[in-house]
Image (cartoon, rainbow, N blue to C red):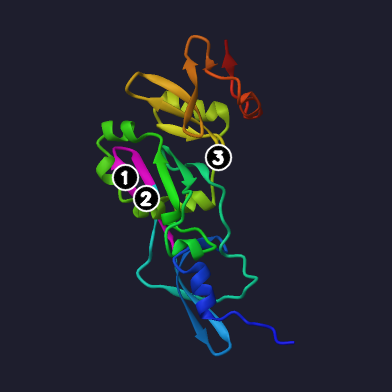
Amino acid sequence: MVTYVDVASDYSTRYEGCYGILGDEVIYASEFQNIGNKVEMMYLPLSLRTESLLKNLKCRYACFPDSPDHVEIKSDTPIFVIPKLGFINTDFYCLFYERRHKKPSPSKYRRGLRPDTIDIYNTSDREISSLNLSNVLSKSMDDMFTRNVYNLFFPKFYGYNEALNFIISGEKLSVALSSSIAIKASYWDNSIALLKNLLVIGDYSEKDNGFKLRTDLFDRDIHNLGIRTVK
């Protein structure tokens, strides 16, 4: 019985142009090569940089290095895991990631995560615009994906009280408590909204120190996160 061994073209079809995790790094797979009886992956390990924006406001983001690295790859190497989509936190606002229903070519053949299979929504777009930061943060979709992909693979969420304090103090514009629940400030009507995915499901009452819900469909999620609600 002859056992088929994957060659570089097989890996290219599945993973070229995809993002994954190698150790504690997020990487971009750029090319696969046959080296003798082995397959090597050429990849770019993303590095984290910090950018100063306004006064004490800083933004940490991922970017590509100048030159690629390489590693031997095997069929059982768990590099191209698919992270959970939904909300992620960046430095002072959160983004919402949603899978596109139709994959473009060549992504329809890929098994890993590529930016052209994802739509990204900034929950604080209008507030960022009011701070005149749009030219810094609102790059192309591919650039936004790359700058924030580390947070997608290694997400950090906040507890309810900490998240609410961030919003009230103005330290953050929006904060994700989980991949599906977030709190955001609205500079346009001076309010704080509770979000389920991209749907507003509650409004913060400063007087009652809690959220008045617009629907009871998500009571279980809200209760599990310790979110204070009021009538």
Are the two marked residues, 3 and 2, in contact with CB atoms closer than 8 angstroms? no
Element at label 2: helix
How many dots with numbers?
Answer: 3
Amino acid of disc 1: Leu
Query: Horizontal placement of 127 versus 34: left or right?
Result: left
Residue 82: image quadrant is: bottom right
Which stretch appears magenta? Answer: 45-59
Element at label 1: helix
Residue 45: image quadrant is: bottom left
Is 57 included in the stretch rendered in magenta? yes
Amino acid of disc 2: Met
x and y percent of residue 1 in the render?
75, 87
* Nearer-N-terminus badge (1/2): 1
On residue 179, the disc is 3
- At 36% across and 19% down in the image, what residue appears? 190
Q: Main secondary structure of the magenta part?
A: strand
On residue 144, the disc is 2
- At 66% across and 26% down in the image, what residue appears? 220
